[in-house]
Amino acid sequence: MTILQAIILGIVQGLTEYVPVSSSAHLILVPWLFGWNNAAITSLPFDVALHMGTLLAVLAYFAGDWVRLIRAGVVSIIERRVGNDPDRRLAWLIIIGCIPGGIAGLLGESAIEHWFHQPNVPIRPAALLLMAGIIALLGLLLYLADRASGHERPLASLSLKDAIVVGLAQALAVFPGVSRSGSTITAGLGLGLKREAAARYSFLLSAPIVAGAGAKSLLDLLGTNLPAADFAIFLAGFLAAAVSGYLTIRALLGYLQKHSAALFVYYRWALAVLIVVVVLARG
């Protein structure tokens, strides 16, 4: 059963990491709704495994982009010039955009862990209601940004100011319910980017942050003794997150080329209502 739960949570992570509905909220809600309290699937190593799975997905999907951007970034350092090369500009705009999120993660991680991620401790009703409010509010902001946006700007038009604004939006993703992709796509739409361009920059921007957070978590795990039986659970979650994450990225980029973000807005509002109803019903 634990392996099955790990696969389900891996699929949940892959489906929700890049869709603007908040993966962190879903990883809290699914075990809470179904009463799953196994120590392995609520542990930091399992969380790291899931995020490494979706990191692999975004690295694999954009492999050609990453090779081109890394090469352009290195050359810009060697030549000490960015110029008008779009790949050099984008490489540095990704780095700049990651700075606010990295700072927020370092400063806010402990407080967020205390409220939402204490192992083997049931999440408090007040925290769930707060998360429901955050989910609904971000849904409203996404709705307004999508409606107001001209959807005319391509990714190549991204400026330094745009990167800072989207980076600040990504910093808000430290709160479960905000969604890293939700906040950054919302910011991108608010800046007038095309939907697909906003999503593409959001996905590229997420990789360094997730990689950095994963590296920090792995360092925190050094010296700890992990039960050998748990490795199968971690591997199952990792693979499920990687495969579902890859498929989700491909599907979402295609969807946003032809459709609005309304589906995700309505989902967020329905999810917020569900959380409130279940919290009140459980009293």
Image: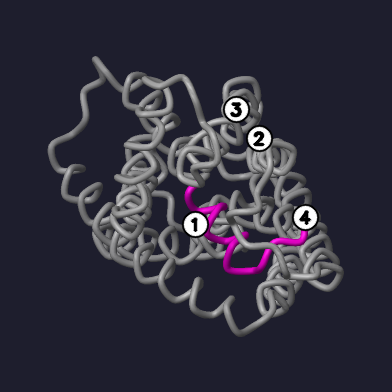
Does the residue at mark 4 contact the one at mark 2 (Cβ under 8 Å)? Answer: no
Does the residue at mark 4 contact the one at mark 3 (Cβ under 8 Å)? Answer: no
Image coords of residue 275 (percent x, y): 70, 64
Q: Is residue 255 left or right of residue 195?
A: left
Q: Quadrant of residue 279?
A: bottom right
Q: Residues within 10 Å of mark 3 (few under 14, many from 20)?
A: some
Does the residue at mark 4 contact the one at mark 1 (Cβ under 8 Å)? Answer: no
> Residue at position x 45%, y 31% from top?
213
Q: Residues within 10 Å of mark 2 (few under 14, many from 20)?
A: some
Does the residue at mark 3 contact the one at mark 2 (Cβ under 8 Å)? Answer: no
Is 21 included in the stretch rendered in magenta? no
Residue at the disc numbered 2:
115
Q: Is residue 261 left or right of residue 129?
A: left
Residue at the disc numbered 3:
99
Q: Nearer the viewer, mark 4 or mark 2?
A: 4
Mark 2 element type: helix
Which of marks 1 and 3 precedes in the sequence? 1
Mark 3 to mark 2 CA distance (whole Å)? 24 Å
Residue at the disc numbered 4:
191
Mark 4 to mark 3 CA distance (whole Å)? 19 Å
Which of marks 2 and 4 precedes in the sequence? 2
Mark 4 element type: loop
Q: Residues within 10 Å of mark 4 (few under 14, many from 20)?
A: many
Mark 4 to mark 1 CA distance (whole Å)? 22 Å
Q: Which residues are magenta?
A: 191-204
Instruction: Tell me which amino acid carries mark 2.
Output: Trp
